Image (cartoon, rainbow, N blue to C red):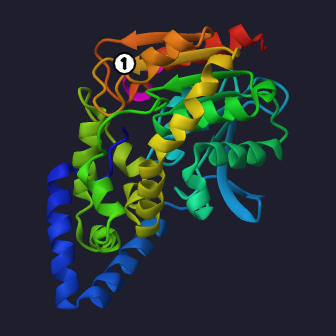
Amino acid sequence: MPAGLIPSPLTVILGLTAALVLLAGCAAVIDAQATRREARWEAANPPAGRFVTVEGHQIHLREMGQPAGSAPDLVLIHGANGNLRDFTFDLTDRLKDDYRIIALDRPGLGWSDSWGTADGDPRVQARILRRAVAGLGVRQPIVLGHSYGGAVAMAWALEAPQDTAALVIVSGATYPWEGALGLWYRINAGPLGSAARHLLSALVPETAARITFRSVFDPHPLPDGYVDHFGAGLSMRRSSQANNTRQVNALNGFLRQMQPGYADLSLPIELVHGEQDTIVGLDIHSARLESEVASARLERLPDAGHMPHHSHPDTVVAAVARARDRAGLR
């Protein structure tokens, strides 16, 4: 499953320290420090696109590439603890000549508002994002989802199959899995969750994010400049951590509800998944999807981890092109 922002050794320290902080009565000091750091992170990483109103809330998105109506619409949905900047680091530049691109911040992450507990359901997220792009005139897009975004992309097709041209699922979390999530998610589900998030925002050095990103990109190196472009501080905010952990903790249950509907999908589905992915296992997710959905085609990458859109971008670009051609888009 998608990893948290904090490496596992730090999660233990955070959990223990959270209890000590509460006992020591330092909550006000921690809160003030977290507020100062969050303001600095937001100032350093302002919205990169524009906002549209959906159901009384704001969704942040960025349009790139070709003008509306001149090329196929391509919607990009990021993974856990992410934001649309993950795609604008490199991938969108490789796609902008052939598509009208709309990259979005998922509800509760990046600069998009949260819908509260409702947006723990990928189907609700898909509905929200679909309405966001519909206001831009998007009809029958190719929908690309990475990691958790793969679940939202699948939900998009399940909820609106006639209005979805094709899917591209990159390292997608699409099936229920056995076993527990990592310690960070378990801490956040318990009584120490709020204190742990305060500690993260107030005290954890930003270099800790770099350590975690290295593990997410493994076995490939972390690209130079990626962490700064991504805006890791946005993901370290208390609200973002709360929304992300709530969504990830709820995902398995919703995938159990979604999975029976997959076999009825007939639209083109292109899957790209690294065999070295230790966060979202290929055999649990993409291989099973290929075996159960006749229109799904899987490209296995023997040397890739969880981030093939960075380590193997040409492969992902080619998958988008195949989805476009299979859907008959020009």
**x, y percent for residue 138:** 80, 36
Decide: is 286 above or below 124. above
Q: Is residue 149 visible?
A: no
Q: Nearer the viewer, residue 178 or 168?
A: 178
Q: Nearer the viewer, residue 136 or 299?
A: 299
- Residue plotted at (70% across, 9% down): 325
Give how far across and how far down residue 242 sits, in percent.
43, 63
Depth order, front residue of 87/305: 305
Which residue is label 1 attached to?
283
Q: Which residues are magenta?
A: 309-314
Examine the structure image and report whether residue 233 is included in the region drawn in magenta: no
Residue occupying the point 28% across, 61% down: 187
Q: Position of residue 180 (x, y in %)?
A: 29, 44
Q: Is residue 42 above or below residue 263?
A: below
Q: Main secondary structure of the magenta part?
A: helix
* 254 sits to left or right of 139: left
Q: Position of residue 203 (x, y in %)?
A: 24, 72
- Residue occupying the point 23% across, 84% down: 22
Magenta span includes 310:
yes
Can residue 21 be seen by looking at this rendering? yes
Kind of residue indicated by mark 1: Asp
Query: Looking at the image, is 139 positioned above or below residue 325?
Result: below
